[in-house]
Image (cartoon, rainbow, N blue to C red):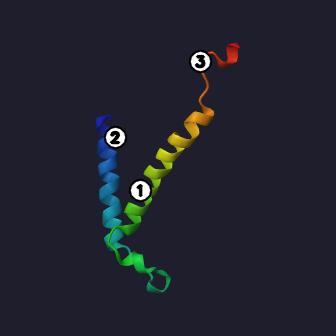
C-alpha cells in the first residue's frame, strides 16, 4: 500500500480508540459485552474481514467466467 494509505489507516485507528474512551455511553442501552474495551472496534474489523473473505471464496467461483466466455 502507498504511504498515505498507512497514514490514513493509522489516523483512523487512533481516532476510533480515542472516541471509544472519551464518548459517553448510556448505561440503559448497553449490553454486557459493551464493557469490554474496544469491543465494537474489533467486532467491526473482524466482521469486515470475514465479509470480504467469504465474498471472495463464495462469489468468485459463481461470478468468474473464462476469458473467451463471450466469444463462444
- Looking at the image, residue 9 sits to the left or right of residue 44; the answer is left
Label 1 crowd bin: few (<14), some (14–19), many (20+), radius 10 Å: few
Q: x and y percent of residue 56 in the render?
A: 51, 40
**Is residue 68 visible from the viewing direction of this image?**
yes
Q: Do the residues labelled 2 and 3 touch (CB within 8 Å)?
A: no
Residue that carries the numbered disc 2 in the rendered image: 5
> Does dot 1 land on a helix, a strand or a loop?
helix
**Is residue 24 visible from the viewing direction of this image?**
no
37 in relation to 13, above or below: below
State how far apart marks 2 and 3 are (Cα): 32 Å
Q: Nearer the viewer, residue 6 or 46?
A: 46
Residue that carries the numbered disc 3 in the rendered image: 67
For the point 40% across and 76% down, which residue is it?
33
State how far apart marks 3 and 1 are (Cα): 34 Å
For the point 61% across and 25% down, which residue is it?
65
Q: x and y percent of residue 37 in the render?
A: 32, 72
Please tell me the numbered disc located at residue 37: none
For the point 29% across and 50% down, which residue is it?
10
Looking at the image, the residue that sits furthest to the right is: 72
Q: x and y percent of residue 67 in the render?
A: 59, 18
Q: Nearer the viewer, residue 42 or 4?
A: 42
Of mark 1 and mark 2, the one earlier in the sequence is: 2
- Looking at the image, residue 3 sits to the left or right of residue 65; the answer is left
Point out the image quarter for the N terminus: top left
Q: x and y percent of residue 17 in the render?
A: 31, 63
Q: Do the residues labelled 3 and 1 touch (CB within 8 Å)?
A: no
49 in relation to 69, above or below: below
Q: Nearer the viewer, residue 39 or 68?
A: 68
> Residue 14: which quarter of the image?
bottom left
Residue that carries the numbered disc 1 in the rendered image: 46
Amino acid at each position: 500500500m502507498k504511504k498515505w494509505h498507512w497514514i490514513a489507516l493509522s489516523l483512523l485507528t487512533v481516532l476510533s480508540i480515542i472516541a471509544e474512551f472519551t464518548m459517553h455511553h448510556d448505561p440503559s442501552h448497553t449490553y454486557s459485552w459493551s464493557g469490554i474495551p474496544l469491543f465494537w472496534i474489533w467486532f467491526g474489523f473482524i466482521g469486515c474481514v470475514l465479509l470480504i473473505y467469504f465474498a471472495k471464496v463464495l462469489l468468485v467461483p459463481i461470478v468468474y467466467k473464462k476469458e473467451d466466455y463471450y466469444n463462444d
